[in-house]
Amino acid sequence: MQVILLKDIKTLGRAGEVKNVSDGYATNFLIPQGLATAATAEKLAALDKQKVKIERLAQERLNKEQELAVRLQGMQLEIKARAAVGRKLFAGISTEDIAEVLKQQRQLIVEPKHIKLEKPLKEVGNYQVAVDCGRGMKAEIIIKIIALN
């Protein structure tokens, strides 16, 4: 009997796959547990439409990630922060601060978790910061911290 898996099953396959299983396994376990459904012509057609839609959405997401990487690469941001007499800042610049500056100055929305900083920036100066744009794409931005007096 052919079934469409509704959930990932470690020994059988991933959700959305069509598998051949014994009639007893399908009718006594998979279907009652909500793990699979019988593969009828209508359900197979709906599954194909759903796969096409998922592929299209994945391609759109990839295009957005590539566009973000291109826009971010080499971008320079200026952040003004209060500093002591030397070069030391009163408060460190975190990934959340950088994401907020990207949103305000460049209208780019980047999750703070995608901005790669080992620790907050705590001194006036220029810093190269990596941004993970997804699927292994990275962009380097330059953060210029200027002291406010």
Image (cartoon, rainbow, N blue to C red):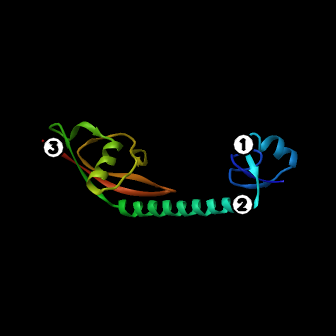
Q: Closer to the camera, 132 or 108? A: 108
Name the mark nearer the viewer: 2 or 1: 2
| Residue 11, position as x, y percentages in the image | 77, 45
**Residue linked to disc 3:** 148
> In this picture, is 22 found above or below 33?
below
Gap in angstroms between the C-alphas marked 2 and 1:
18 Å
Q: Amino acid at mark 2?
A: Glu
**Residue linked to disc 1:** 34
Q: Amino acid at mark 1?
A: Gly
Q: Residues within 10 Å of mark 1 (few under 14, many from 20)?
A: few
**Residue linked to disc 2:** 42
Q: Closer to the camera, 4 or 58? A: 4
> For the point 44% across and 61% down, which residue is it?
64
Q: Residues within 10 Å of mark 2 (few under 14, many from 20)?
A: few
> In this picture, is 51 found above or below 11?
below
Q: Residues within 10 Å of mark 3 (few under 14, many from 20)?
A: few
- Name the quarter where the C terminus is drawn: top left
Q: Amino acid at mark 3?
A: Leu
| Residue 91, position as x, y percentages in the image | 25, 36
The reply, left or right, for residue 38 in relation to residue 112 is right
> For the point 31% across and 47% down, which residue is it?
100
> For the point 18% across and 44% down, which residue is it?
147
Q: Secondary structure at mark 1?
A: loop
| Residue 50, position as x, y percentages in the image | 62, 59
| Residue 9, position as x, y percentages in the image | 73, 45
Earlier along the polypeptide chain: callout 3 or callout 2?
2
In contact (CB < 8 Å): disc 2 and disc 1? no
Rendered image quadrant of residue 55: bottom right
Rendered image quadrant of residue 66: bottom left
Residue lying farthest to the front in this orientation = 42
Earlier along the polypeptide chain: callout 1 or callout 3?
1
